[in-house]
Image: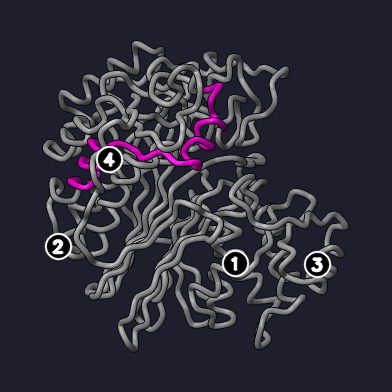
Amino acid sequence: MLDAGGNAVDAITATAYALGAVEPWMSGPGGSGFMVIWLAAEQRAVALDFQGVLPRGLRLQDYPVDPGLPPTPMGFPAVAGNANTEGYRSITVPGAVAGLNHALARFGTLDLPQVMDPAIRLAERGIWADWFTTLQIALCAPVLAGDPVSAATYLPGGHPHRPERVLRIPNLAGTLREIAQGGSDSFYRGALAGRIVADLQAGGSRISHEDLAGYAVREFAPMQAGHRGHVLHTCGEMSGGLRLRDFLAMTGSEMPAPPRAPAPETWLAYARALDACWKAHKIRNGAVTETGACTSSMAAVDAAGNMVALTSTLLNRFGSGVTLPGTGLLMNDAVSYFDPRPGRPTTMAGGKRINSSNMCPTVAVRDGQAVFALGASGGNLIMPAVAQVAALMTDFGMSLEAAVHHPRIDASFRGSVRADPRLGEAVLAALEGLHGDLEVAGSAVYPKLYACVSGVARDPATGICSAVVDPSQPVGGGAAPGPFDPGPEPPAGTVVRA
């Protein structure tokens, strides 16, 4: 998109749609998210909330608590049949299509068919499965096996899709083509919406035509956090943004003048601040604790200085596990964002929008110019990771690359702190004194113990842009301007399963 003359919003929109075709278990049209945009010419930031919404016809009695089951990944009680985390009753009205198209129409420069063309071509080509694809499928095999379309797509012959095979999702390319041609109207109000609702209701969802047609994106002024001469723009209370602002305020108070380089006391200050802001969050939201959630995080910057941070998600890996038969859309399980018990801040209610998330897309501005944009994937791990990378860059002047590659801690008021052993013995000793229970663990592909951060940066003095993804993320990547090439068609003799 940049090579075609587009801006950062065009690029981020195209990337988000493309990820739905090549990494559908993390995000896609069946999901939701947040976006923060810095508009260089207007010297202002904009935030978009395109989170999921519960169907108006939802009934709390459809989700009876089952004390015999373990808590959900969000920390709420499980319900009978895991109906709030698996299957059709776990699906909220998805906001991704509305959010992406809203951003493009308001702040992009290219048209939707051009922006979605790479995603359509990738969906037609299929996913070149590798070991990481097989790992993702294997981790969710029991849930996928419960849905006929998902089972046929991802578990051919009853086994996870093998590496070095091409995985094609039935009907997905056609659905993306319809969205490209008809825009949000096709997805929420047109013939495509009719097929989506028909599939949902046939599976037991209470999502109606009115629910889809009534979906609206929230555009608002971002929450701001000042720190070391920077203004960080986030999506505020409904995201991890409020905790990020609290964290920066606490570390700024405890460490008015940072040392020349991070010291043991630095990490102790970071750990205390993370625990404190998480304690306040859990009190506000009824002890929400999101673990195991999976998202896609991306950022973009262009030569004019526009910058975007976007985080989108199906919530848990493979979301609800449901692939709609008529459209190939893998759907979210965002009902699990809500508490099945009455009388709580996040209690389920018909028409209620997700009001508590860990997603934390952030754009930092200094002297009127965006200097970096960050986000991460990883549930509860997201906000602590984004906060530390932002702090390392603003407290110590680290480059984006140095900050993302620096070993980190993780803390969320859970009675312990996790620390990467590369921080060194002195840091580990200081952290051990905080709780007396220190988890020493390195960053790995799986299990994911630290979030996967991605971001872009721009030097206002030179205009030079840079980008980096978390080194533990084997499928992360960055792109400079250049023609898009989806790769060749599968060679003759390649096994193609769908």
Numbered disc in front, either 3 or 1: 3
State whether residue 117 is above or below residue 193: below
Determine crowd level at label 3: few under 14, some 14-19, many 20+ residues with C-alpha closer than 10 A. many
Residue denoted by label 1: 388
Q: Looking at numbered disc 1 in the image, what kind of residue is underneath it?
A: Gln
Determine crowd level at label 4: few under 14, some 14-19, many 20+ residues with C-alpha closer than 10 A. many
Q: Is residue 119 left or right of residue 331?
A: left
State whether residue 255 is above or below residue 18: below
Q: Which residues are magenta?
A: 116-143
Q: Looking at numbered disc 2 in the image, what kind of residue is underneath it?
A: Ala
Residue for point 53% across, 70% down:
390
Q: Position of residue 482 (x, y in %)?
A: 22, 64
Sequence-wise, the earlier of marks 1 and 4 is: 4
Determine crowd level at label 2: few under 14, some 14-19, many 20+ residues with C-alpha closer than 10 A. some
State whether residue 393 is above or below residue 218: below
Q: Give the Cα distance between marks 1 and 2.
A: 35 Å
Residue denoted by label 4: 97
Residue for point 84% across, 58% down:
435
Sequence-wise, the earlier of marks 2 and 3 is: 2
Task: Give the structural element (helix, strand or loop) at label 4.
Answer: helix
Residue denoted by label 3: 428
Q: Give the Cα distance between marks 3 and 1.
A: 16 Å
Q: Position of residue 427 (x, y in %)?
A: 78, 71
